[in-house]
Amino acid sequence: MGSDALEDVRFVGYRRKLIEDIRARGINDLGTLQLFDRVPRHLFLPEGVRPRAYEDGPIPIGFGQTASQPSLQAHYLTILEPQSHEKVLEIGTGCGYLTALLCLLADRVYSVERVRELSQRSRRALDTFGVKNAALLVGDGTIGWRKYAPFDVTVVSAASPSIPSALVDQLAVGGRMLIPVGALDTQELVLVRKTGTEVTEEVLSGEVKFVPLLGRFAWGDEGSG
Ligand code: SAH
């Protein structure tokens, strides 16, 4: 605990720089920028890459996976606007950093990760950070998490060839979902909204590049894990 606190002091300046970098990417919402100031990203990263914790870029977190670029996550949050009474489903816990950001905004966050070690590491980091409203599950997020559905917000942090129907089914009326859809090398971000009986899909501008969503209703799961 003590060394984490010391490390935090050392990282404060870098965190300020990260917030400037996020702002430079066009995120001007003060609440979102302040949110990134509240979460010590280095806590969520493996020791070896901690010096790079406040770079605005993807970072390897082991198991062939990468933590997403913070400014992209900031962009996600400004689109989805999770509210303090809302339930969030996150697919791809990864290092748990976005989970932590979501926990500060929403009532409860349900996060599914297929790699057990990453989920366990995220649990420890979230405990150290001190959030109590995250539930983590090791499993295939392409089937969602039916037990706690419906969700007001769904964030998919891995790329899928199509939108898994379970995730749409488990969206609440008034719900919003962001998911990268496309090929293995590049994708587009799709914003799905559920209003009453209607479901709309909007392709947002710009290409993104995420690691593949591996599971029953995405890229398949053979030989990995
Ligand atoms: N927001 C996370 C992103 C991690 S990368 C972060 O910044 O750390 C995407 C994650 O999705 C990886 O950890 C990968 O293991 C996980 N993943 C891939 N397919 C999945 C699936 N079907 N269900 C749950 N998690 C999955």
Image (cartoon, helix red, strand yellow):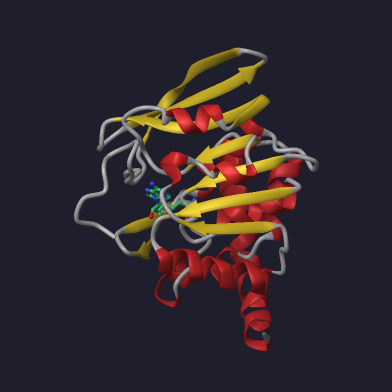
Query: Relative to 32, is 202 above or below?
Result: above
Q: In the displayed image of the protein, which residue is found farthest to the bottom?
A: 2
Percent of width and height locating residue 46: 44, 72
Q: In the displayed image of the protein, which residue is found farthest to the right?
A: 85
Q: Report the residue at 35% width, 43% height from top.
A: 213
Q: In the displayed image of the protein, which residue is found farthest to the front?
A: 147
| Quarter in which the C terminus is drawn | bottom left
Q: Would you identify the image quadrant in which residue 207 lies?
A: top left
Q: Report the residue at 80% width, 41% height from top.
A: 85
Query: Relative to 5, is 206 above or below?
Result: above
Q: Report the residue at 67% width, 85% height from top.
A: 1
Given residues 179 and 52, the one toward you in this image is 179
Q: Would you identify the image quadrant in which residue 152 lies?
A: top right
Given residues 140 and 208, the one toward you in this image is 140
Q: In the displayed image of the protein, which residue is found farthest to the left?
A: 223
Q: Report the residue at 62% width, 13% height from top.
A: 197
Q: How many marks?
A: 0
Q: Is residue 183 visible?
A: yes
Percent of width and height locating residue 217: 34, 36
Q: Is residue 34 visible?
A: no
Percent of width and height locating residue 100: 64, 57
Q: Is residue 217 left or right of residue 21?
A: left
Given residues 145 and 126, the one toward you in this image is 145
Percent of width and height locating residue 168: 52, 27
